Image (cartoon, rainbow, N blue to C red):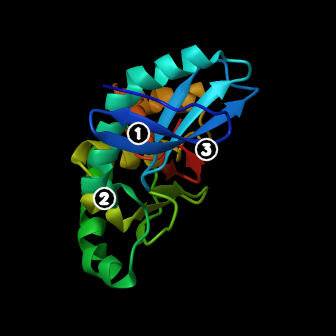
Amino acid sequence: MMAMRYNYGMKKGVYYGNRNIRCHLKVSKRSRRLRVAVYCDGRCIITAPRFMPDFLVNKFISDKSRWIISKIDFLRRFNYKYRPGGSRAEYLKYKETARQIAKERVDYYNQFYNFKINSIAIKNQKSRWGSCSRKGNLNFNYKIVLLPKLLCDYIVVHELCHLAEFNHSKNFWDLVGKTIPDYKKIKKEFSAYGGSPVGGKSIK
């Protein structure tokens, strides 16, 4: 049996079976629909439009309860892999392996773009998976070695395409889609693990 407590702007319980997860409910005057996000640190944020009837919010949470709990359980097992930044000892341990992977994947994908690259660097960035400078320097977080290959490749292509389009315009996403046609699905996967930033901006 499932039960729920609901209050705007307050923490509430999401129940599924014998599980009880505490979530935070936010009201946004800009939001047009109900949304739920589970972050890498285990937070669950439910966003509701202003004046949304209580029964609709409750129904939404009830419908999403199983999904919320499954995502939290998943992150408790694997969230470490999806969070940028780590200890210096770990950075030094994986740095060269990450460099080899980054160079290999950049070389592979750049055969389809033929962009001019100045350098490839591996860093221990605290809030980014990658970045690109106007000088043609590509930087990647060492933790790309801990990501599934699909997500790693997405980061590589994302930064590679910034060499031609230093923005997130339609032209940029068209370039990304040239080699990763299902990039929208991958972006959603990143969002499920906290909307991890690439290039200093949220993946969108």
Give the residue pinned by disc 3: 166
**Which numbered disc, 2 or 1, marks the residue that appears first in the sequence?**
2
User: In the displayed structure, does residue 83 sit left or right of residue 195?
Assistant: left
Q: Is residue 186 visible?
A: no
- At a point 47% along the width and 49% down the height, the residue shown is 159
Give the residue pinned by disc 1: 192
Q: Is residue 13 visible?
A: yes
| Spot occupied by residue 45 in the image (x, y as percentages of width and height) | 54, 40
User: In the displayed structure, does residue 102 sit left or right of residue 133?
Assistant: left
* Residue 182 drawn above or below residue 164: above
* Residue 153 drawn above or below residue 51: below
Q: State the residue in front, 39 or 83.
A: 39
- Element assignment for label 2: helix
Amino acid type, callout 1: Ala
Closer to viewer: mark 2 or mark 3: 2
Give the residue pinned by disc 2: 81
